[in-house]
Amino acid sequence: MKPPPGRAPLATLLSTCVLALALVVTASAVTALVRGPHQVTSATRQGGHWVNTWTGMPQLTEVGNLPPAPFTGERSVLADTTLRQTVRVTVGAHRLRLRFSNAYGDTALPLTSVTVALPVGGRAGVGAIVPGSLHRVTFSGRAAAVVPVGAQVVSDPVDFELAPGSNLTVTAYTAQGQPDLALTSHPGSRTTSYLASGDRTEDPDLTGATTVDHWYLLSDVEVLAPAATRAVAVLGDSLTDGRGSTTNGNDRWPDQFFDRLQSRAGTSDIAVLNQAAGGNRVLNDGLGPNVLARLDRDVLSRSGVSWLILFEGVNDIGTAAATPQAQQAVADDLIAAYRQIVVRAHAQGIRVYGATLLPFGGNAYDDGGGVREAARQRVNAWIRGQGHFDAVIDFDRVVRDPADPSRLRADLQVGDWLHLNPTGYGALAAAVPAGLFGTS
């Protein structure tokens, strides 16, 4: 029998109500999943965005850079360990989030609890924090997180007042630790970190802790910033990672370059991201993956990057055989790689600035016959050539010895005729035209 006109059967009404309720619940759940805890703010509605303000290039920890006993065991590392680290951010904000990397782990990495705070005195490499500045960090609303093999995890946003160029303390506790010895880290931190047994993430001072000059697990700090805030990433080797700079001094050349940007009204909203590692190469893996392999991870996928400074290649020349054939090949391959990097960065709207390679006369890379030096000169001539990069930064010109251009100036190098001292790094920082990154 048909129902009377204008009236639906009870089953139809019930089905309609259930469907409507399901749609509302589903929409709410999807909205919650997309937003995450505290993610939608007035800043994002008004055009704010997340920008990386600090990075430490992840790499596999060599045996000699693993945490000392008892924090490294026979089959695991950082078990029942609190790790307190300081990093110097570049641009500041009122809200931040963290990224932890398990890029090189063979097993999942469980994080038990994480906090952020301000270090005492605002200094790098200290184990004490400012009372009242500590905030707990959560991941999808939970204190703990598991970082899958080869992956990273992003924390929930944390309301935290962070001044430009300030130091931030990040403390993590790993109850289980990394259940293998394949630990992800950035060994060349030039910053002191602290290791202690038990969960001491909320302790005001890690008294009695063991100190190491390495960073572990933490790979990024991001801030929620106005739409105009952007970042410049630097791809480099130990000359950018800061070999020869001051431990806890933050006087690598990217640090000093950031200080210059901060002093100018037109560039004070630009973050500087140091994506370098000692021993790194453009063409082949060395300490860390080669530049062609890590470009997407370390630059193209970083938040807010608009510019890239490419300052790498000396290790490729220095580790290739000192024969005309080998050096011809490595120079050709470097030039081809630079072209690839420019194409890939331009595809993401990123401008690329090429920096010339520094001399190494007197270092072990110097073959005595000038074969490697000839390759360096050829590569630099190409970098300086018209139209290859969006701009050229001639680092070679500012630190080479005018009396012997195959060598560094004696007063700017650290003693090995390859790496610079803080004054030398200051010369590099001063050579970068700030106008390339904003308006004065």
Image: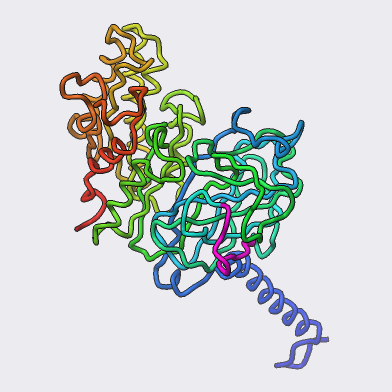
First to last magenta residue range: 127-138
Residue 403, quarter of the rendered image: top left
Question: Which of the 4 quarters of the picture holds residue 316?
Answer: top left
Please give the name of the residue rendered at 41% of the width and 66% of the height, measured from the top-left corner.
Answer: 48
Residue 190 placement (x, y as % from top left): 47, 40
Q: Residue at x 64, y 57 (%)?
A: 114
Does the magenta segment cover residue 329?
Answer: no
Residue 135 belongs to magenta span: yes
- Check the picture and name the quadrant holding the N terminus: bottom right
In depth, the one of 286 and 335 nearer the eye is 286
Q: Please indicate whether residue 431 sits to the left or right of residue 365 in the image.
A: left
Expressed as whole percent of the image width and height from the top left, the position of residue 158 reads 55, 65
Up the image or down, 173 lies above or below 311; here it is below
Left or right: 218, with 328 as reference point: right
Residues 145 and 20: in front is 145
Magenta: main secondary structure equals loop
Which quadrant holds the C terminus? bottom left
Q: How is this picture coloured?
A: rainbow
Percent of width and height locating residue 226: 38, 66
